[in-house]
Image (cartoon, rainbow, N blue to C red):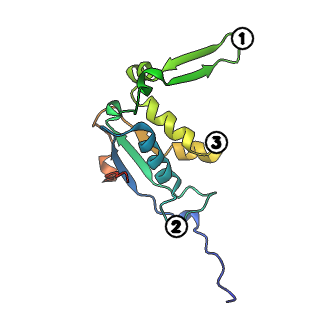
C-alpha cells in the first residue's frame, strides 16, 4: 500500500515514565538486565535503536541485593591506571562496603551500549543505597519485577 511507511517517533513525542524498583533480595544480574531493558526502551512498541525512548529508573535498597553462588567473595572488578603496574583489583564485597550502589550501576552500564547513547541512557538511572530517594515529586510508579 503506497503511503504507509514506517512511522518514527519524534524526540518531542517521546513519553518517559518514572519507575521505582526495590532491589531488596533481588539477584544482581537479573535485576540489572531488567533495568537495562527498561532504560533502553525495548518494552515500548515504538522502540528505535538510535533514540533514547526508555524510562527513568530509580532503584532503592541497593545495599540489600544478593548474588547467586559465591560471587560476593569471588567476583573481581579490575581497573587500570594505564601506567606499568597500575592494575587494581576490588572484590564485590569490598566494593559493596565502600559504595553500595556501585555493583548495580556497573552491571547496568555493562549491559547498555558503549558510546554516547549508553552514557546518555545511564544518566536516566538513579541508584540509592537505602529506601530514601528524592524523586517523590516525579511520582515514580512501583515496578514489581517478576522472574519466570
The answer to which of 141 and 137 lies nearer the viewer is 141
Give the foreground label among 1 and 2. 1
Which quadrant: the N terminus?
Answer: bottom right
Q: Would you name the residue on which mark 3 appears?
A: 114
Could you tell me if the residues under marks 1 and 2 are in contact, i.e. CB atoms within 8 Å?
Answer: no
Q: Count the labels in the image.
A: 3
* Label 3 vs 1, first from the N-terminus: 1
Quarter of image, res 10: bottom right
Identify the residue shown where x is 54% and y is 67%.
46
Reply above or below: 11 against 134.
Answer: below
At a point 44% along the width and 27% down the height, the residue shown is: 71
**Residue 118 relative to residue 3: left or right:** left
Q: Nearer the viewer, residue 12 or 30?
A: 30
Task: Write down the residue under mark 1.
Answer: 84
Q: Residues within 10 Å of mark 2 (few under 14, many from 20)?
A: few
- Callout 1: 10 Å neighbours few (<14), some, many (20+)? few
What is the distance, in whole Å, between disc 2 and disc 3 at their CAs? 25 Å
Of labels 1 and 2, earlier in sequence is 2
Q: Which mark is residue 137?
A: none
Q: Horizontal and vertical percent for residue 84?
A: 72, 11
User: Left or right: 35 with respect to 110?
Assistant: left
The residue identified by callout 2 is 13
Measuring from the top left, give residue 111's x and y in whole percent: 55, 43
Question: 55 or 95, which lies in front?
Answer: 95
Quick one: SS at disc 3?
loop
* Quadrant of image for the C terminus: bottom left
Q: Residue at x 55, y 17 (%)?
A: 89
Amino acid at each position: 500500500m503506497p503511503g504507509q511507511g514506517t512511522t518514527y517517533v519524534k524526540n518531542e513525542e517521546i513519553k518517559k515514565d518514572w519507575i521505582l524498583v526495590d532491589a531488596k533480595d533481588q539477584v544482581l544480574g537479573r535485576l540489572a538486565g531488567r533495568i537495562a531493558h527498561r532504560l533502553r526502551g525495548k518494552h515500548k512498541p515504538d522502540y528505535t535503536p538510535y533514540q533514547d525512548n526508555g524510562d527513568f529508573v530509580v532503584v532503592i535498597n541497593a545495599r540489600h541485593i544478593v548474588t547467586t553462588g559465591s560471587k560476593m567473595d569471588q567476583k573481581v572488578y579490575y581497573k587500570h591506571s594505564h601506567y606499568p603496574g597500575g592494575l587494581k583489583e576490588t572484590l564485590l564485597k569490598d566494593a559493596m562496603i565502600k559504595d553500595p550502589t556501585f555493583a548495580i550501576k556497573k552491571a547496568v552500564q555493562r549491559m547498555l551500549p558503549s558510546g554516547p547513547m549508553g552514557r546518555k541512557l545511564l544518566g536516566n538511572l538513579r541508584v540509592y543505597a537505602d529506601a530514601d530517594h528524592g524523586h517523590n515529586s516525579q511520582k515514580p510508579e512501583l515496578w514489581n519485577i517478576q522472574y519466570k
